[in-house]
Amino acid sequence: MNQKVVFRSLILVILFLLLAKAIHWVVIVSGFNPGDVELSTTFAILLFMIVFYLIAPISIGFLVKSPSENQALVNRLNGILDSLTWKNRVILFDHEEKYIFTTGLLTLYSCTYLSTGMLKYLSEDGLKGVLAHELTHVREHHILLSLITACVVVLVVHPFELNFMLLTGFFIFLAIRRLLEYRADVGSAKLVGKQALLKSLFELSALKPTNAQERWFVFAQPYPTLSMRIRALETGMHPLF
């Protein structure tokens, strides 16, 4: 991985840790009962999650300093985007690793980032599939729904003060995140066709095959495995575990 990206990532981690500490301190000095540590901590967690999601685009912009200037790759991406009936802002950035991800709570401020490594690796149909998947996340407000779900889980779990309820809430949040991934696949299949999406999933599976450990511990992951997503498209069933 690029050393500059690693360095900037470490800086971001440190800044987020300092931000979490600062938010907790502000909540405590803002009038919360000092004896009610649980309430102040819960409110601080909610505030941190909201701020984290809001500034995510700025954080990614810090990591991805400038769009790629490789005109051939930019033209290839634009040609694929022109073939889609629904579009969103997509930034191509120079990186040998294969990445694609989307940030932004609201559609107006959302952006999909695609690495040149991923663009070079995938076929035309494969690129259409992954781009349509990310665009569906934006179109159906999945990032906003993830934040709302996380906030609701924190608020519901707070009164119980039980580790069991905390774990239950955590796994419920992960299950909903997996459902949103399936929803993005459904939207992608409608946008570019089922075969194009399957093509992208098979190509990604060849890049990173699902191992037995991933399959057994999928309940603790926010995303279904690629093999689960392929099976869901082929059968119409959406297993959470």
Image (cartoon, grey):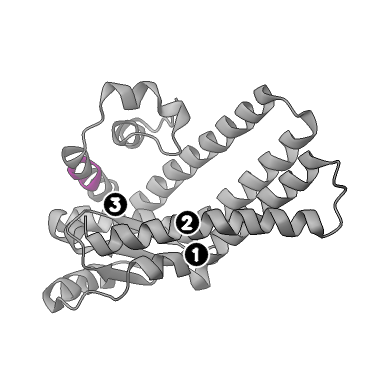
Q: Amino acid at mark 1?
A: Gly
Query: 10 Å neighbourhood of mark 2: few (<14), some, or many (≥20)?
Result: few
Q: Amino acid at mark 2?
A: Ile
Q: Where does residue 4 sit, x and y in percent of width and height?
A: 27, 64
Q: Amino acid at mark 3?
A: Gly
Q: Where does residue 102 sit, x and y in percent of width and height?
A: 41, 60
Image disc number at residue 26: none
In this picture, residue 83 sits left or right of residue 54: left
Marks 3 and 2, how far apart at CA: 42 Å
| Mark 1 or mark 2: whose residue is earlier in sequence | 2
Is residue 141 visible in this depiction of the protein? no
Image disc number at residue 14: 2
Residue drawn at the location 34% of the way across and 24% of the way down: 215
Q: Where does residue 144 sit, x and y in percent of width and height?
A: 57, 56
Instruction: Please give the range of residues in magenta.
Output: 199-203
Marks 1 and 2, how far apart at CA: 22 Å
Name the residue that disc number 3 marks.
193
Camera-side residue of 26 and 72: 26
The answer to whether the residues at label 3 and label 2 have Cβ atoms under 8 Å apart is no
Q: Where does residue 142 sit, x and y in percent of width and height?
A: 52, 53
Camera-side residue of 199 and 24: 24
Q: Main secondary structure of the magenta part?
A: helix
Residue 231, quarter of the rendered image: top left
Query: 10 Å neighbourhood of mark 3: few (<14), some, or many (≥20)?
Result: some
Quarter occupied by the N terminus: bottom left
Name the residue that disc number 1 marks.
104
